[in-house]
Amino acid sequence: MQKIVVLTGAGISAESGLKTFRDSDGLWEGYNIEDVATPQAWERNPALVQQFYNERRKSVLEASPNAAHYALVKLQEKYDVTIITQNIDDLHERAGSTKVVHLHGIITRSQSSLNAEFTYPINGWEIKMDEVCELGSPLRAHVVWFGEDVPMIETAARLCSTADIFMLIGTSLAVYPAAGLINYVPSPVTKYIIDPHIPYLQSNRNIRAIEQKATVGVPAVVAQLLEAV
């Protein structure tokens, strides 16, 4: 069974009504990134950061997977599919994908503010400031902030190096280290890039660019791949 590795970004979730991580004005849902998505922001104003991610979590839980998420699930019928996502939502899992690696964490879990390895399920959509981990520190969203390590990046790089087919969906390749993952995909491997705005790549070897939004381009590519087996 051939192995397909898929890297998804904000574009696939945007079609489910979730705002992309950073709008053209540099803001995320009206907030400066530095005020809500850094360890320093948590030190300065933990209540604001907690409120911000509680609101994002509520939006995620109200959203539903779209045609692109469901199309990727169909690939599992004939391929060994692993999805690496830069997104902090759980839409891939809710659609039915069984092997999902979250590079930047997942907002539907909480974590210790002292040790990111201590994670917990969240009852509902809200983390309260008086909730603490087993170490006694306040709980925060289980997401990777700017300035923090990306613990799953080595796992993701290893997965990319084993791909027989690679798909890049809804990402501008602007956020590192995730943007460098395509460089680990072997050169001979076919690489499908699905996005209304195809990002620039230094190497264009075996690139198949589909300049469409995810809900159109992904089902079309999936249909081709399923017919090819």
Image: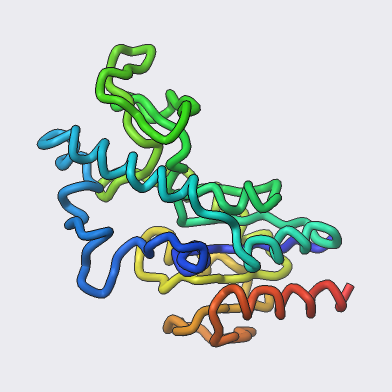
What is the quadrant of residue 128 in the picture?
top left
The C terminus - image quarter: bottom right
Q: How is the image coloured?
A: rainbow
Outermost residue on the left side: it is: 44
Q: Quadrant of the N terminus?
A: bottom right
In the current view of this chain or complex, which residue is farthest to the front?
62
Relative height, residue 134 to residue 92 (above, below): above
Q: Find residue 29 and report its horizontal and vertical position in percent.
A: 27, 59
Residue 214 placement (x, y as % from top left): 57, 74
Looking at the rendering, which quadrant does residue 213 occupy? bottom right
Along the line of sight, the residue nearer the viewer: 6 or 21: 21
Q: In the picture, residue 82 is in which quadrant?
A: bottom right
Q: Nearer the viewer, residue 5 or 43?
A: 43
- Seen in the picture, residue 93 relative to 3 is either above or below; the reply is above
Q: Position of residue 109 (x, y in %)?
A: 46, 33
**Residue at horizontal 35 percent and vertical 63 percent from the top:** 175
Measured as percent of width and height from the top left, residue 211 is found at 54, 87
- Residue 212 visible? The answer is yes
Locate residue 61 relative to residue 55 in the image: left or right: right
Residue drawn at (63%, 48%) of the image = 94
What residue is rendered at 18% in x and 39% in y? 48
Residue plotted at (60% across, 57% down) = 65
Compare residues 177 and 58 and report the one nearer the observer.
58
